[in-house]
Image (spheres, grey):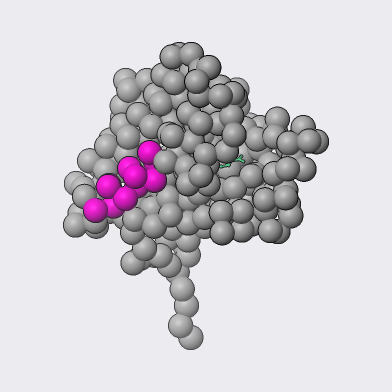
Amino acid sequence: MTQIDFRLDGRVALITGGSRGIGEAIARVYASAGAKVVIASRYMENLKPVAESIAGEGGEITPIVCHMGYTEQIRELTVKTLEKYGTIDILVNNAATNPFFGNMVDAEEKAWDKTVDVNLKGYFIMAQEASKVMMKNGGGNIINISSIAGMSPPPMQGIYAITKAGVISMTKGFAKELGPHNIRVNAIAPGLTDTKFASVLIQTKEILEVALQGIPLNRYAAPMEMAGAALFLASDASAFVNGAVLTIDGGAAA
Ligand SMILES: NC(=O)c1ccc[n+]([C@@H]2O[C@H](COP(=O)([O-])OP(=O)(O)OC[C@H]3O[C@@H](n4cnc5c(N)ncnc54)[C@H](OP(=O)(O)O)[C@@H]3O)[C@@H](O)[C@H]2O)c1
């Protein structure tokens, strides 16, 4: 019988922002598909319970502290991952921030700097680091978590939207550059998803009502609903998918 291969047995997957939300969901699914998983975030106290829970279910997982706004910490994360597992086969650039909610014209420079440092420069340096390892190993796979905000900026989230549009451009640029090295680079553009990141939007009744009007499925997503696409893109099931942006938003951007 013909079978599509969604397994990741023995592959090393590094997931930034793996301590909760979408990153945690992807870590759980990758571990259950047989990957050796590294989860990174700023705080070991957030990473540890997730790692213990996944290990308790038989997964191979290592938590590593890394602030994605600092290049030297990203380089250290790469070194520690290589020390532990010897390679990086899959990178999920997922950790992001959105410190400023308001009109762009009123934003302070430090809000711009922080958002761009983590969401754009952090993704970029991390992709550089991982792709150098992947090139040596004859191939790999990079998945960037963007957002539908990167396709059409929502009100009050202009700076965040700029970084997420940049992630889409970065994905396509790296896909062209790294394809000849057998490294596929794709993006996922989630819509509204029930995580700490989106908690203000989901918990503020008036904002949620307006948001749901724009979502044909009339609901927001659970983090696990992003993980299936992340498994597809990391696995051989998507072997000819490169430079794609997979929108998972209940139809909001349609
Ligand atoms: N939720 C949504 O509606 C939605 C929609 C579209 C796109 N997205 C995208 O989905 C991705 C994941 O977001 P989420 O919704 O899962 O959010 P979340 O639940 O708040 O998780 C964010 C993760 O990133 C980590 N993190 C935050 N700042 C960091 C930094 N400077 N350095 C390293 N790690 C950092 C957090 O861990 P620590 O606090 O432990 O550092 C956490 O693990 C983001 O790229 C976001 O833009 C989300």
> Is residue 82 among the parts visible in the rendering?
no
Image: magenta residue range: 166-176
Identity of the residue drawn at 35% across and 29% down: 121
The relative height of residue 159 versus residue 223 in the rendered view (above or below) is: above
The quadrant of the picture occupied by the C terminus is bottom right
Identity of the residue drawn at 41% across and 19% down: 113
Locate residue 110, reporting x and y percent: 45, 13
Q: Reply yes or no: does residue 80 show up in magenta.
A: no
**Nearest the camera: 211 or 49?**
211
Which quadrant holds residue 82?
top left
- Residue at far right of view: 205
The relative height of residue 117 versus residue 189 in the rendered view (above or below) is: above
Give the dominant element type of the magenta stretch: helix, strand or loop: helix
**Nearest the camera: 160 or 198?**
160
Is residue 224 found left or right of 143 in the rendered image? right
Identity of the residue drawn at 43% across and 34% down: 163
Locate residue 73, reporting x and y percent: 36, 22
- Residue at far front of view: 105
The relative height of residue 246 versus residue 62 in the rendered view (above or below) is: below
Locate residue 210, reporting x and y percent: 73, 43
If the picture is divided into quarters, which one holds ligand 1? top right
